[in-house]
Amino acid sequence: MPAKDDVSGLKSLGQSQTQYPAQADAGLLETFPNTFPQRDYVVTLESQEFTSLCPKTGQPDFGTITIRYVPDERCIESKSLKLYLFSFRNEPAFMETLTNRILEDLVAACAPRQMTVVGDFLARGGVTITVEASYDR
């Protein structure tokens, strides 16, 4: 019998009009039950449109956020993740802070077995920055 996904608790997915938040908000993250919690498998999510602000100059920073995780009981819903990541648009913070904050928020939302968040940011002043933060239960 094919597995059936439980979508009853999802609010963002399927909305006809998307509302973009004005500030970073972990409350935007939604999860759904993992249909295969008995199995270890890796989920990779990537957003190439991440933006935030330099906390000193207020200039925009651009980057790619890659999330790799082994789910336990819950999985991250991708549209809510998009809204969550977009909520950093006006957030003044260094890349190291952002990457670790994203990891903490995602771990709190879905309690994975393992998770790594990589922030790969475009050059600013001729220097690129890549930050990798990991969690292991």
Image: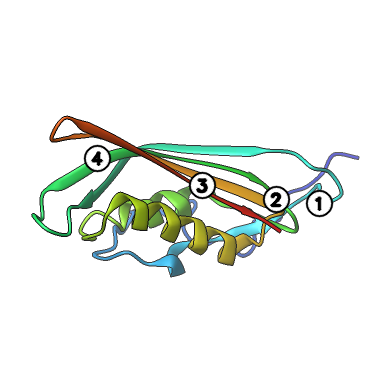
Q: How many marks?
A: 4
Q: Amino acid at mark 1?
A: Pro
In depth, the one of 85 and 99 nearer the eye is 99
**The residue under label 4 is which amino acid type?**
Phe
Q: Residues within 10 Å of mark 3 (few under 14, many from 20)?
A: some
Distance, label 1 to label 3, CA atoms, is 18 Å
- Mark in the foreground, 1 or 4: 4
Q: Is residue 35 above or below residue 28?
A: above
Residue 71 - label = 2
Q: Which residue is mark 4?
A: 62
Q: Return the disc, 1 or 4, that comes first in the chain's sequence.
A: 1
Image x and y of residue 80, in percent:
46, 55
Q: Closer to the N terminus: mark 1 or mark 3?
A: 1
Crowding at dot 1, Cα within 10 Å, few <14 / some 14-19 / many 20+, comes out as some
Query: Which one is earlier in the sequence, the residue at label 3 or at label 4?
Result: 4
* Three-letter amino acid code of the residue under disc 2: Pro
User: Which residue type does callout 3 highlight?
Assistant: Ser
